[in-house]
Image (cartoon, rainbow, N blue to C red):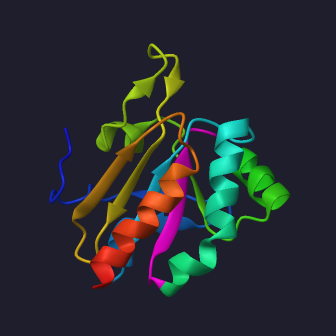
Amino acid sequence: MLQLGDTAPDFTLPTDKGDSFHLADQRGQPVVLYFYPKDDTPGCTAEACAFRDQYADFLDLGAVVVGVSSDSEASHQKFSQKHRLPFPLLADGGGQLRKAYEVPRALLGLLPGRVTFVIDKDGKIAYIFNSLSGATDHVRKTKEVLRGLAN
């Protein structure tokens, strides 16, 4: 199980924008890596839109925001365009990243879990928040952690 202070597993995955996102390229700035179950479902849409609506706050805190699910790049592209998401969504089709980050399944193993990681500027895990039902709580709690890292 990943713990606070562990080095975040490195990865490269395709984005909804048609390029690749490589975690190691983000060193020097904090990264908010949020795993969500599925594009265009009510909770996932609320979470993505909450990150979108407060995106300027994340930029002010120097953070990169990235969403991850097992949906395809095409699905992510539609979801991102529909909701005008300013951050990339990563396609983890085989679930390898979800496994590397040990994101548990929810609801008796029927749904992929909703877990947010804050990775500090040195690539260490600074925060882990696991809550399927509190979709928008991920945004609030993550900003609190980032403010603490900035001090």
Q: In this view, does 98 lie above or below 104?
A: below
Residue 98 showing in the rendered view? yes
| Residue 10 coordinates in the image, percent (x, y) | 30, 59
Residue 27 showing in the rendered view? no
Q: Which residue is drawn at 27% across and 55% down?
A: 9
Q: Is residue 92 magenta-colored?
A: no
Quadrant placement of the N terminus: top left
Q: Is residue 65 magenta-colored?
A: yes
Left or right: residue 46 versus residue 78 is left
Left or right: residue 110 versus residue 129 is right
Quadrant placement of the C terminus: bottom left
Looking at the image, which is closer to me, 96 or 3?
3
| Residue 75 coordinates in the image, percent (x, y) | 74, 45
**How many numbered marks does the figure carry?**
0
Q: Residue at x 66, y 39 (%)?
A: 43
- Quarter assignment of residue 15: bottom right
Q: In this view, does 20 lie above or below 46?
A: below
Q: Give the range drawn in magenta.
A: 61-72
Q: In this view, does 95 lie above or below 116?
A: above
Looking at the image, which is closer to me, 10 or 62?
62
- Quarter assignment of residue 2: top left
Q: Residue at x 16, y 56 (%)?
A: 6
Left or right: residue 17 versus residue 93 is right
